[in-house]
Amino acid sequence: MARHILPQPGLGTYRLKEQAVIDSVTSALELGYRHLDSARMYENERAVGKAIRQSGIARDELFVTTKIWWNELEPKALTAAVEESLDNFGLEQLDLVLIHWPSPGGEVAMADYIGALDAVRARGLTRHIGVSNFTIAQIDEALTLPGGENIVTNQIEVHPFLANRKLVEHCQAKGLDVTAYMPLAVGKVLEEPVLKRIAETHGATPAQIALAWIAARDIVVIPSSTKPANQKSNLEALDIHLSEAEMAEIDRLDRGDRQANPSFAPRWDE
Ligand SMILES: NC(=O)c1ccc[n+]([C@@H]2O[C@H](COP(=O)([O-])OP(=O)(O)OC[C@H]3O[C@@H](n4cnc5c(N)ncnc54)[C@H](OP(=O)(O)O)[C@@H]3O)[C@@H](O)[C@H]2O)c1
């Protein structure tokens, strides 16, 4: 399997704030997670930073991501946002800063925000830069812009009900890591009969089978959980090996079922 820049797996933190995110990050770090996925929109950067400090884990063992919301894409606003996020986390450098969504309707020119993002990287405020929710055309545009050559990932929705095959393969062919958000379809995978049956064969759970299927496609997963037992089980999912027949069976569950489709989303690839 190819080496990723992003550690496999990461811990998602969407919807978790204050003590809930401190508890989730604390138990995940104890279990061995080293990659934390936050965002300015989640309003949990301060709490994630507190959990990191309390863990006592050396900074260079951790991989911390945040994302810039679409109302902060103008170069000055983006620069100020990254500086504020560093202050929120209490860190001197982030590992990855992502553009959370492409500018709705192209209101801010992509060259402006990719250039500004790469400028904060060049200043050492983040080790890496990347994008999220970019389509094939938007990835192609971003990669040709000044600074775009430093993009390391496209974080997109991927789970058994949304294989997102064309976009995944396009990003991988361009040498990018693909990061799968909502890898459990926010819990929808748990009751799926095919996943349940395959899970029984492996003495596993449907959630683990969904994660194993994504990871086998060379994609980094970032499931979130408030429960240490689920976090542990999600880590262990990465040791499950699915047969070609099982992979193909799960491939057939694809039904283009998107969980994240806000009004400001780009026109998705089919
Ligand atoms: N870039 C973007 O636009 C974007 C959009 C959405 C999400 N994200 C990122 O992706 C991360 C993951 O997405 P998500 O949190 O929305 O959804 P998810 O990871 O697909 O699902 C999380 C849900 O699954 C449950 N769960 C987790 N592990 C489980 C297990 N082993 N067994 C049973 N249930 C389990 C959790 O409940 P419990 O707490 O009870 O375990 C939680 O309700 C987010 O946290 C965020 O960091 C990014």
Image (tube, grey):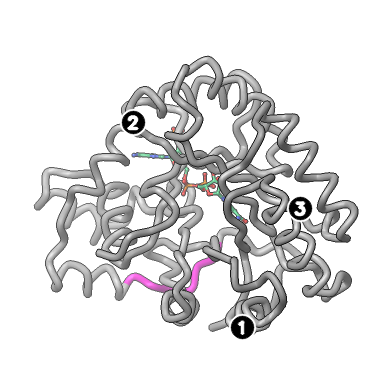
Q: Label 3 sits on what residue type?
A: Trp
Left or right, 99 with respect to 239, comes to right
Q: Which mark is residue 69?
A: 3
| Total marks placed | 3
Tell me which label, 1 or 2, sits earlier in the chain.
2
Local packing at callout 3 (Cα closer than 10 Å; few below 14, some 14-19, many 20+) is some
Q: Secondary structure at mark 3?
A: loop
- Residue at figure coordinates x 67%, y 54% from the top left: 121
Q: Nearer the viewer, residue 264 or 135?
A: 135
Please state which of residues 46 and 143 is positioned toward the viewer in this rendering.
143
Prevailing secondary structure of the magenta residues: loop
Estimate how packed mark 1 is, as few (under 14), some (14 to 19) or many (20 or more) residues with alpha carbons within 10 Å. some
Mark before the other along the chain sequence, 3 or 1: 3
Residue linked to disc 1: 140
Identified at 17% across, 51% down, the residue is: 240
**Kind of residue sitting beneath label 1:** Asp
Amino acid type, residue under disc 2 in the picture:
Gly
Local secondary structure at mark 1 = helix
